[in-house]
Each structure stands twice: as C-alpha cells, then as structure tokens.
Image (tube, rainbow, N blue to C red):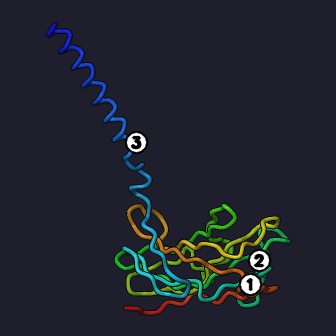
C-alpha cells in the first residue's frame, strides 16, 4: 500500500511542478519587452532627459503640401495629394555619439522620419554628440487617403540599437498646427548645451 501511495504522491508532485513551471513561463516577460527602449514622456516643447538621450520637440509643428530647402526644388508629399508633418526638435546624446532618429505614430501606423530631404536640413541621420544639441526638423510623409488625426505621438532619440536605452515620447497636437502650401526647412544647427 505504501508503494502505491508514494507513487501517487510522486505523480501529484510532478504534475504540480509542471503546472508551476507553466505559470512562471506565462508570467515571465518576452525578451523584446526586457530589451525595448524605456519611454520617457515629455510635454511638447519641454526638455526631457533619458538614459543616453535628451531633447525637446513639438514647440513648432507644421503640416505642409511641399518642403524645400532654401527655395530649391521642392519635395512633394508621398503623392500629389499627400502632405508632410514637420516637427521642430532639438536633441543630443549624453554619453555616446549616435545619429538622430524618430518615428511618428498615427492612424495605427508607425512611420519613420523621412530621409528624402538632404541631411543638412533634417535631423534623422545627423551625428549627435554629448553636450552638443542639434536643432532642426523631423519630417514625416502622410500618404493621400489617410485621414489627418488631431494628435500624433512622436518617439525620438538615438538611432541604431537602442535596446535598454531611452526614447523620448511627445504627444503632438495637429489640430492647432498651421497648414501651409510650402515649408522652407532651415539647416540643422548645433550648439553647446550643458
């Protein structure tokens, strides 16, 4: 009788261990969650500081049909009926060099900043250095047929591998943004910042 009772207790203990291991596996976060950049929420126009990134964006926002750099040939939106969303920003790294990057979330889409305008007038691709803030524009193409939302979410920071780093997140109000036929992008400007 003792053999059957011991065998049943062993089976029950084994089943409990399997159920416990399954429960732990369900509670453990996915690797992507553990390595994803930490979002730092920043109000539009306010200076935010993350782990290796600092910056401000959204003080000036424009919706334009075309972009140009100092009167040269303009870039139309993604299509003739498309538009550009341009967000002025200032960004710097705190410890390591890197390049600026940004994405815009709207209408369920996550859109990277455009690389069509030359790097002299757009922040994406600009070299970021500790203590030197780069100021300029993040520009995003909105194709025709996608309704313009009242607000979007801008995520910006250092490009490349940002696992376990920070990304600055700003809500951008598009309802108040001026609509222009053409926006002239001024060159990226660098300045020392403590």
Residue 178, picture quadrant = bottom right
Q: Earlier in the sequence, mark 2 or mark 1?
A: 1
Q: Between tags 3 and 1, which lies in front?
A: 3
Numbered circle sitting on residue 120: none
Other residues around mark 3 within 10 Å, as few (<14) / some (14–19) / many (≥20): few
The answer to whether residue 16 is left or right of residue 164 is left
User: Label for residue 68?
Assistant: 1
Q: CA distance from mark 2 to mark 1?
A: 6 Å
Q: Residue at x 49, y 89 (%)?
A: 190
Foreground residue among 64 and 154: 154
Q: Position of residue 70 (x, y in %)?
A: 71, 90
Determine contact: label 2, label 1, CB under 8 Å: yes
Q: CA distance from mark 3 to mark 1?
A: 52 Å
Of all residues, the one furthest to the front in this rendering is 1
| Label 2, residues with CA under 10 Å away: few <14, some 14-19, many ≥20 | some
Quarter of image, res 177: bottom right
Q: Separation of disc 3 and disc 2 at Cα?
A: 49 Å
In the displayed image of the protein, which residue is found farthest to the right?
A: 80
Q: Earlier in the sequence, mark 3 or mark 1?
A: 3
Q: Which residue is mark 2?
A: 75
Which residue is under mark 3?
26
Q: Position of residue 75 (x, y in %)?
A: 77, 77
Q: Nearer the viewer, mark 3 or mark 2?
A: 3
Quadrant containing the N terminus in the rendered view: top left
Q: In the shown orientation, is residue 182 left or right of residue 12?
A: right
Residue 5 in percent (x, y) is at: 19, 13
Mark 1 burial class by Cα count in 10 Å: few <14, some 14-19, many 20+? some
SS at badge 3 = helix
- Image mark count: 3
Helix, strand or loop at disc 1? Answer: strand
Local SS, label 2: strand
Above or below, comparing residue 17 to residue 91 in the picture: above
């Amino acid at each position: 009788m003792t053999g059957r009772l011991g065998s049943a207790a062993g089976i029950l203990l084994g089943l409990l261990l399997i159920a416990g291991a399954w429960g732990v596996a369900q509670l453990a976060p996915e690797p992507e969650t553990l390595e994803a950049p930490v979002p730092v929420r920043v109000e539009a126009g306010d200076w935010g500081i993350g782990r290796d990134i600092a910056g401000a964006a959204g003080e000036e926002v424009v919706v334009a049909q075309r972009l140009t750099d100092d009167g040269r040939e303009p870039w139309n939106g993604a299509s003739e009926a498309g538009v550009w969303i341009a967000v002025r920003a200032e960004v710097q790294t705190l410890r390591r060099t890197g390049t600026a990057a940004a994405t815009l979330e709207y209408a369920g889409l996550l859109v990277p900043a455009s690389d069509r305008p030359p790097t002299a007038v757009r922040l994406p691709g600009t070299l970021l250095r500790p203590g030197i803030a780069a100021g300029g524009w993040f520009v995003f193409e909105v194709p025709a047929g996608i309704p313009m939302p009242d607000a979007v979410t801008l995520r910006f920071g250092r490009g490349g591998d940002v696992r376990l780093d920070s990304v600055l997140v700003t809500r951008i109000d598009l309802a108040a943004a001026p609509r222009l036929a053409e926006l002239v992008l001024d060159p990226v400007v660098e300045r020392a910042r403590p």
